[in-house]
Image: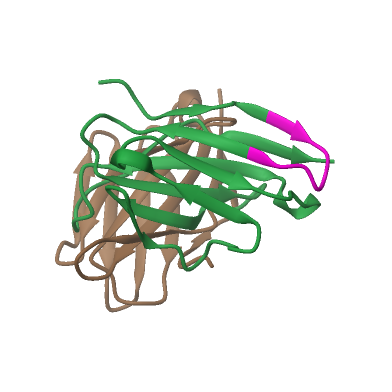
Chain colours: A brown, B green
Amino acid sequence: SQQGEEDPQALSIQEGENATMNCSYKTSINNLQWYRQNSGRGLVHLILIRSNEREKHSGRLRVTLDTSKKSSSLLITASRAADTASYFCATARGGGYQKVTFGTGTKLQVIP
Amino acid sequence: EAGVVQSPRYKIIEKKQPVAFWCNPISGHNTLYWYRQNLGQGPELLIRYENEEAVDDSQLPKDRFSAERLKGVDSTLKIQPAELGDSAVYLCASSPKGGEYSPLHFGNGTRLTVT
């Protein structure tokens, strides 16, 4: 079963624009992670935000987390054609080990 | 470091045939996951190992799926017999340990087509 739902399902923007993807989840979490998947490839970890953090930056990526609303957003600034991929949020929960559950994904297309 | 290696990359079989997928995780990673990803969907967990112990196999269809991780390193996922609905990408991932803050490292997956 999918823990998270992403919005929008698909997004098409021009190169240089910003892309924002949202993720909503259902249960309490230890951390939330964002992954990228290029067509025909495995997922690549982008950034992890802990449940006690509200915002995190990594290069052109900015992630926010609102645990009261059970939601997160991923912002990619100054997008490039190489950012074209599917993006998934994943929630980690559980004591002792992390059960990592993925959302449904947002398919991003960046037009050169 | 070498990444997670999966083989084969693609597999086409007829229904009712058996199939096996192999995964070699990153050296030193104790935790190993098998996920199934249907077209246009996110990965769904099938089984998780801590070393050689399966600690979460609640989502594994045990009537036809089996997995093993001998010596706590490589892992094999088997389907017998395969059904049409098993067509999907099977992803293996590993992480340093099953703690709270360990991101997953994925292989490129095995794309299974059942005809």
Identify whether B64 is placed above or below B93.
below
Image spot of residue A99 (x, y percent):
34, 62
Is B14 within the magenta? yes
Image spot of residue B3 (x, y percent):
34, 25
Q: Which residues are magenta?
A: B11-19
Please tell me which residue lies in front, B37 or A55.
B37
At a point 54% along the width and 61% down the height, the residue shown is: B60
- Dividing the picture into quarters, in which one does residue A92 lie? bottom left
Asked if residue A11 shows in the view, the reply is: no
- Dividing the picture into quarters, in which one does residue B94 lie? top left
At a point 58% along the width and 48% down the height, the residue shown is: B37
Is A58 within the magenta? no
Identify whether B66 is placed above or below B63.
above
At a point 82% along the width and 46% down the height, the residue shown is: B15
Image spot of residue B83 (x, y percent):
77, 52
At a point 25% along the width and 21% down the height, the residue shown is: B1
Asked if residue B105 shows in the view, the reply is: yes
Image spot of residue A39 (x, y percent):
58, 31
Residue B25 relative to residue A11: left or right: left
Residue A38 relative to residue A31: left or right: right
